[in-house]
Image (cartoon, helix red, strand yellow):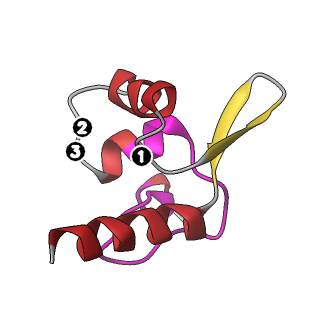
Amino acid sequence: MATPQDSRATLRSGLPDRYLTPEDLAEMFSLPSVETVYAWRKKRTGPPGFRVGKHLRYDPEAVRAWVNSLDKEAA
């Protein structure tokens, strides 16, 4: 049986097989607060997200593609 720790999203061990929450992104990127994720969305600088009702979610593959694009820009 999986523990809550096992379901955490981390880039090093791979992304989970579920849509990510803004809290997941804040934890993954060690952000000071989840408000940073919301600011990224408002400025359209972060990974693309989508709404499910009132909830914001992120596709793990879209997050990976966004991170890869940052790597390419830095090179």
The crowding category of the residue bearing disc 1, from other C-alpha atoms within 10 Å (few below 14, some 14 to 19, many at least 20), is many
Residue at image point 56% right, 41% down: 21
Residue at image point 43% right, 45% down: 46
In the rendered structure, the answer to whether residue 21 lies left or right of residue 67 reads right
**Residue 66 falls in which quadrant of the image?**
bottom left
Report the magenta stretch's main SS: loop
Q: Does residue 19 show up magenta in the picture?
A: yes
Distance from the alpha carbon under mark 3 to that under mark 1: 8 Å
**Which of the image's four quarters has the N terminus?**
bottom right
- The reply to whether discs 3 and 2 touch (Cβ–Cβ < 8 Å) is yes
Judge by depth and name the residue closer to the eye, 68 or 60: 68
Say whether disc 2 or disc 1 marks the residue closer to the N-terminus. Answer: 1
Residue 1 in view (yes/no):
no
Judge by depth and name the residue closer to the eye, 50 or 16: 50
Residue 35 position, x and y percent, is: 37, 21
Residue extent of the magenta highlight? 5-25
Instruction: Identify whether 19 is placed above or below 30.
Output: below
Which residue type does callout 1 highlight? Leu
- The reply to whether discs 3 and 1 touch (Cβ–Cβ < 8 Å) is no
> To which residue does mark 1 refer?
25
Q: Does residue 75 show up magenta in the picture?
A: no
- The reply to whether discs 2 and 1 touch (Cβ–Cβ < 8 Å) is yes
Instruction: Identify whether 58 is placed above or below 72.
Output: above
**Residue 32 falls in which quadrant of the image?**
top left
> To which residue does mark 3 refer?
30
| Secondary structure under the numbered disc 3 in the rendered image | loop
